[in-house]
Image (spheres, helix red, strand yellow):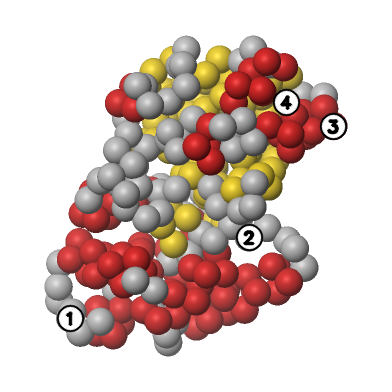
Amino acid sequence: MPLDIRTIPCLSDNYAFLAHDPATGDTALIDAPEAAPILAVLDETGWRLTDVLLTHHHYDHVDGLAEILAAYPARVIGAAADAERLPALDVKVAEGDTITVGEETATIIDVSGHTVGHIAFHFPASKAVFTADSLMALGCGRVFEGTKPQMHESLQKLANLPADTVVYSGHEYTAANGKFALTIDPENPDLISRVREVAEKRASGTPTVPSLLSEELATNPFLRAHDPAIQAHLGMEGANATDVFTEIRTRKDNF
């Protein structure tokens, strides 16, 4: 059976996720922005928290951890490369390593760029990838520590996952990302339609996360630096995709 995954709004625009294995009862938390909403879902479901998977060290992904661990002494897993900045880890992982949650296995993907040492967790059997602030719905995270070419490389790893993978990203930024995307890819009918759908969801208070990777491949400009229409719109016909991505990310930084 696939993981039962719950999306939990936290803080003003963060998301945490609980991934529950029905076969064993084991449950993983992906990131811990704040404790109260996460503990409320655990109380409501009766799920037993066994693991915490940390994507990166930023406060809005780890600040709720101590209170959560006080209630549930779970195993904490994070990047070996970022261990000095993360809360204390029980398991340190790097790209290509695997972990298990119940009967499910996840592969670790290094998606450095937003931070150095940022990781994603890919659960292929459940067709799920937890990307936090790397690949986001209609966008990608700001490049704080790495380089833009590094971020482009990281996103290409995620783009190469099966198109029916569900992308669980870390923030409700989709409406703003959509407005920017239209400045890069204004004639894309899939993007125009998606931006309209996002506006409807947000008007009703519905989360726009998670999203399908196939949607991102069709509409997210940060995954489409190779697209001739985008290159032409930017006046960069035939340019290297990494250079086009760098231009797109620079424009977003100034948007």
Residues at discs 3 and 1 in contact (Cβ within 8 Å): no
Q: Which residue is mark 4?
A: 22
Q: Residues within 10 Å of mark 2 (few under 14, many from 20)?
A: some
Mark 3 or mark 2, which is nearer the start of the sequence? Answer: 3
Q: Nearer the viewer, residue 235 or 122?
A: 235
Residue in the picture at 63% in, 60% down:
208
Residues at discs 2 and 3 in contact (Cβ within 8 Å): no
Residue in the picture at 31% in, 65% down:
249
Camera sees residue 33: yes
Mark 1 or mark 3, which is nearer the start of the sequence? Answer: 3
Alpha carbons under labels 4 and 2: distance apart: 25 Å
Q: Quadrant of the C terminus?
A: bottom left
Image quarter for residue 253? Answer: bottom left
Q: Which residue is mark 1?
A: 237
Q: Which residue is mark 2?
A: 208
Q: Residues within 10 Å of mark 3 (few under 14, many from 20)?
A: few
Residue 201, compared with residue 135, is above or below; it is below
* Front position among marks 4 and 3: 3
Residues at discs 4 and 3 in contact (Cβ within 8 Å): no
Alpha carbons under labels 4 and 1: distance apart: 50 Å
Residues at discs 2 and 1 in contact (Cβ within 8 Å): no
Residue 250, compared with residue 27, is above or below; it is below
